[in-house]
């Protein structure tokens, strides 16, 4: 799209005549007519004024889409549809080499990330078992606050290792962050490659989801069967076993989910459509604050009550709440874009 075409497009989207634009520019209508016909081009100061009037960048006005792709919604103008420049965003080109590198890195980091998340859950299981062991099967060397301190120290070691691994994996994938935040224009052949890999991965994804659900159900079974027993140590062991099964399920869910998500990012499907990227960019700062507060509340309550076998319920509850808020934000944003 050339500069004359853009000036005409912007003017029509505002519903202005050439004379109205000329009045705002403090020039003659004939000058606007010459710009739009390509008979002459506006001087630099006029281009700057045009960008201010229509709230677009000078880059958008001057570059004729060479090396840049602009995407946006369509608006009805004088009986025909035209790109809505006011809602356009620059799409980042993605090469085949970048796509291959991203898919490989996602698979590697996905397994590592899943492992570190599971490690933190295993740490919680160890904490529950150690506290139960100290309380119900006491040893002279691990009594009272000494024993509780040892259990909490073991848990914090697991958390430290897991959290460090999660951060380092996030840094490795940070160079591909634009795929989930910005509109992209994949190079020819990428869509076919990704669709082929996604189809091949589908069985493994279903197996991982099914296996994860099976581990969770297996972990719940002893807790249900032994609920009537009046033996706190056995009940504690059942809780620890459940947390261990949750750790295995989390590994399957997270590793498979990250690989599946890498396909959706390149195809801009599922949670990574252009509309959902816009919503994510809006709520992401709030999400960071939200989860920091949740973590602080969880640790504060857990250390104060020393009820680690029960306080973990905070995470699924806050997760469901956050998911509900995200869905509401997505619905409202989609409604606004349609309007």
Image: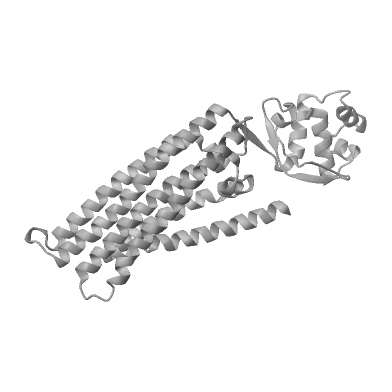
For the question of whether residue 312 can be seen, the reply is no
Q: Nearer the viewer, residue 176 or 63?
A: 176
Q: Is residue 323 left or right of residue 241?
A: right
Quadrant for the C terminus, please.
bottom right
Q: Residue at x 45, y 53 (%)?
A: 209
Label total for image: 0
Viewer-side residue, 54 vs 297: 297
Point out residue 8 in the picture as x, y percentages from the top left corner.
84, 35
Furthest residue toward right: 30
Residue 58 spot, x, y in % from top left: 71, 30
Q: Position of residue 24 (x, y in %)?
A: 83, 38
Q: Would residue 338 be found to the left or right of residue 211 on screen? A: right
238 to the left or right of 22: left
Residue appearing at x 42%, y 35% in the figure: 172
Image: 278 above or below 139? above
Looking at the image, what colour scheme do you see? one colour
The quadrant of the rendering that contains the N terminus is top right
Nearest the eye: 72 or 87 = 72
Q: Quadrant of residue 232?
A: bottom left
Against 252, residue 214 (above or below) is below
Residue at 78% x, 34% y is 50
Residue 169 visible here: yes
Instruction: Give the residue displayed 27% in from the left and 57% down from the top.
Output: 125
Q: Which sits in the foreground, 122 or 52?
A: 122
Q: Is residue 53 left or right of residue 113?
A: right
Q: Give residue 87's quadrant in the image.
A: top right
Instruction: Find residue 139 and report its horizontal and vertical position in percent.
Output: 9, 61
């Amino acid at each position: 799209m050339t500069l004359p075409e853009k000036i005409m497009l912007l003017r029509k989207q505002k519903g202005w005549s050439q004379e109205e634009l000329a009045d705002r520019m403090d020039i003659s209508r004939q000058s606007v007519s010459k710009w739009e016909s390509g008979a002459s081009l506006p001087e630099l100061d006029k281009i700057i004024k045009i960008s201010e009037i229509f709230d677009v960048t000078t880059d958008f006005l001057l570059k004729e889409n060479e090396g840049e792709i602009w995407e946006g919604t369509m608006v009805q103008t004088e009986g025909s549809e035209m790109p809505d420049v006011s809602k356009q965003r620059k799409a980042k080109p993605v090469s085949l080499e970048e796509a291959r590198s991203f898919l490989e890195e996602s698979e590697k980091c996905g397994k590592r990330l899943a492992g570190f998340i599971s490690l933190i859950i295993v740490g919680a299981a160890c904490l529950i078992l150690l506290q139960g062991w100290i309380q119900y099967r006491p040893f002279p060397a691990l009594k009272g606050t000494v024993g509780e301190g040892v259990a909490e120290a073991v848990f914090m070691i697991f958390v430290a290792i897991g959290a460090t691994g999660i951060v380092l994996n996030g840094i490795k994938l940070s160079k591909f962050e634009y795929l989930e935040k910005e509109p992209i224009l994949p190079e020819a052949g990428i869509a076919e490659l990704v669709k082929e890999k996604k189809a091949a991965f589908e069985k493994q994804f279903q197996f991982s989801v099914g296996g994860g659900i099976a581990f969770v159900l297996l972990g719940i079974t002893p807790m249900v069967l032994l609920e009537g027993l009046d033996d706190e140590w056995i009940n504690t062991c059942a809780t620890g076993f459940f947390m261990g099964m949750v750790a295995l399920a989390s590994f399957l869910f997270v590793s498979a989910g990250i690989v599946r998500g890498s396909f959706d990012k390149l195809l801009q499907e599922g949670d990574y459509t252009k509309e959902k990227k816009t919503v994510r960019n809006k709520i992401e700062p709030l999400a960071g604050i939200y989860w920091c507060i949740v973590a602080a509340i969880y640790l504060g309550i857990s250390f104060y009550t020393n009820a680690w076998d029960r306080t973990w319920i905070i995470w699924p509850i806050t997760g469901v709440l956050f998911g509900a808020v995200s869905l509401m934000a997505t619905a409202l944003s989609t409604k606004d874009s349609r309007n």
